[in-house]
Image: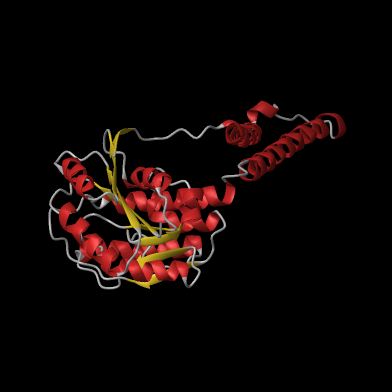
Amino acid sequence: MQISLVIPLLNEEESLRELHDWIVKVMTEHALSYEVLFIDDGSTDKSWEIIEELQAKNQHVLGLRFSKNYGKSQALNAGFKKTKGEVVITMDADLQDAPDEIPSLYKKITEEGYDLVSGWKKKRYDSKIRKNIPSKLFNWAARKTSGIQLNDFNCGLKAYKSNVVKTIDVHGEMHRYIPVLAKNAGFSNIGEQVVKHQARKYGHTKFGMERFINGFLDLLTIWFVSKFGKRPMHLFGLLGTLMFVIGFFAAFTIGAIKLLNVFYFEKPSPLITDTPFFYISLTTMILGTQLFLAGFIGELILRTKKNIPNYQITKEI
C-alpha cells in the first residue's frame, strides 16, 4: 500500500462526506493505493455514524472511536499504530487542508528521500489577532529552540516515511512538535512544502488561545526532554553534587574560622548556629542532596517504566 491517511477529528459531521469524496477523487486520478483512518476523538455529534456509513461503501476507510476526548496527539498516536502504507500523511478533517496536496507530498517522500515533509500554510485565512500573530511567535520560538528551520510547525498536513511514525511516541499535546520528536529519534532529513490553506467551511475551530500557552510550555518540556530525558542524572546529579560541595565547603570554612578564633587567636567567637551563613550552607547541602536523589529516581523510572496507552478505544472498524 502506498499511502495511509490519518485524520483525527472532533465533531466534524458536516465535512466528513465531502472530505472523503475529495480524497477518493484525488487517489483515483493519480492511481494511488491508499487507506483512510478516521480517528473520532470523542465526538458528540453524528461523526462516528458517518464514518461507519463511509466504511460500508468504501473498503479503504477505517475508523477508531475514543471513549472521550483525549486530544489530537493521542488520536494521531493511535492512528500511527494502525497504518500500513509506505507513506503516512496526516491532515485535519475540517476541509482547511486540501487533499490535492497529497500526491506532491507523497513524491517528496518517495522520490526526494525526505523522512518528513511539513506543510507550510504561507497564506492563511484565519484571524490575524487570534491565530496568525501568535502562530508566528510560536514558530519563531520553536525554530530557535529545536534548530529545525520550519515556518509552520503546527500545520496538520504532514507526510512521513512509515518507519518515522512507528518510531516516535506522540502524547500529551506534542503533535505540534512531531518534527522535533522525529529529529530526536534520528530522522534529520526534514523538508517543507507550501500548501494551500482554505477558510473553514463548516462549524468553528476546536482550539482557543490557550493552545499557544500550552504550546510554549510543551516547547520547554520537549527541549528539556531532548536534552536530558535519557540521562536525568546528567542534569540533576551535576547540579546536586555542585550545590552539596559548595554548601559543604562553606560550612567547613565557618567551622574552621570558629576553631582558629578560639584556639589560635584566643578571642571570643559567636556560636556557629548564630551566623546566617551556617543555615545557608546547610540549606545548600540539603537541596544538593535532593537534586541528586531526583536524578537517581529519574534514572530508575526510565529503566522500569512500561508503555501504557493513555487513551481508550471503544470501537474499531
- In percent of width and height, residue 10 lies at 22, 45
Indicate left or right for 80 with 113 as reference: left
Give residue 101's quadrant in the image.
bottom left
User: Residue 192, position in %: x, y?
Assistant: 41, 70
Q: Quick check: can you spot residue 147?
A: yes
Give the image location of residue 171, x and y in percent: 41, 43
On the image, the x and y values in percent for residue 179 come to 45, 59
* On screen, residue 227 above or below 252: below
Q: Residue at x 64, y 41 (%)?
A: 233
State the quadrant of the N terminus. bottom left
Quarter residue 245 falls in? top right
User: Can the viewer see residue 181?
Assistant: no
Label total for image: 0
Q: Residue at x 39, y 66 (%)?
A: 106
Q: Could you tell whether 301 is left or right of 29 in the image? A: right
- Residue 207 appears left or right of 287: left
Q: Nearer the viewer, residue 243 or 98?
A: 98
Which residue ends up furthest to the right in the rendered image? Answer: 264
| Residue positioned 21% across, 66% down in the render | 128
